[in-house]
Image (spheres, rainbow, N blue to C red):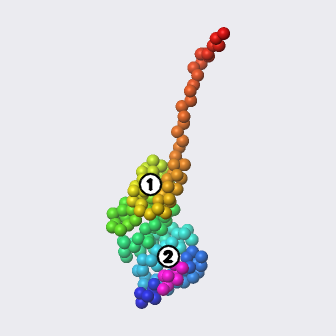
Amino acid sequence: MGTLVNNYIFKALESYPFDLEEVMEALNFALSYDDKNTMALTLMGRVYAEKLYKYEEAIVYFKQALAENIHAFEVYTPYINTLLWNEDYKEVEDFIDFALTVKGSDKALLYLKKAILHEQLKDYKTALTFIKLAKEHTFNSEFMADIVIEKERIKGKMPKKKKAKATKKPGKTPKNKK
């Protein structure tokens, strides 16, 4: 049975996001054979979040997948994104803090998501602190480039410091010497 479920999951993954009808059909078959399959639950959550914008329904699928296997790392990123889109800031912060304690989780990605959380909260200085942590935990040149892009975007949102202007004191003007 595992092979049949995997075939439907592969079919859904291959079709996502271009042929949503095919994706839904394959996911429904996969979940009918194994309603606890974390990959199928995650992709179903992604469809609800990314294509239907039904964040609450998506969160239910992600939580169900995590309840089955906390090491289902494929859930982490779409779940965090959905919580951010749904403005569930406390929940996303708690989840990221927890995920950072899970052995094998992608710490660089989690710190980057925490930076994005603080960016959305307009706490840019803290966001840059988490960008630095993401850099420290990155061991991939491509991902490092993504972090640099995120850092520049956050820096671009920070309020500009005003330069002190040299002001003239009223009544004192320099006199021309002859």
As drawn, 94 above or below 14: above
Residue 131, position as x, y percentages in the image: 44, 54
Residue that label 2 marks: 44
Relative depth, front residue between 17 and 150? 150
Q: Residue at x 41, y 87 (%)?
A: 2
Q: Residue at x 54, y 34 (%)?
A: 163
Residue 165, position as x, y percentages in the image: 56, 29
Q: Secondary structure at mark 2?
A: helix
Q: Secondary structure at mark 1?
A: helix
Relative depth, front residue between 5 and 134? 134
Q: Is residue 127 magenta?
A: no
Q: In the rendered image, which quarter is residue 38 located in?
A: bottom left
Q: In the rendered image, which quarter is residue 89 located in?
A: bottom left
As drawn, 165 above or below 134: above
Dot 1 or dot 2, earlier in sequence: 2
Cα distance, mark 1 to mark 2?
A: 30 Å
As drawn, 139 above or below 20: above
Residue 105, position as x, y percentages in the image: 38, 67
Residue that label 1 marks: 131
In the rendered view, does 44 fall on the left or right side of 97? Answer: right
Q: Residue at x 48, y 82 (%)?
A: 9
Q: Main secondary structure of the magenta part?
A: helix
Q: Amino acid at mark 2?
A: Met
Q: Is residue 11 magenta?
A: yes
Q: Amino acid at mark 1?
A: Ile
Dot 1 surroundings within 10 Å: few (below 14), some, or many (20 or more)?
A: many
Q: Which residues are magenta?
A: 7-14
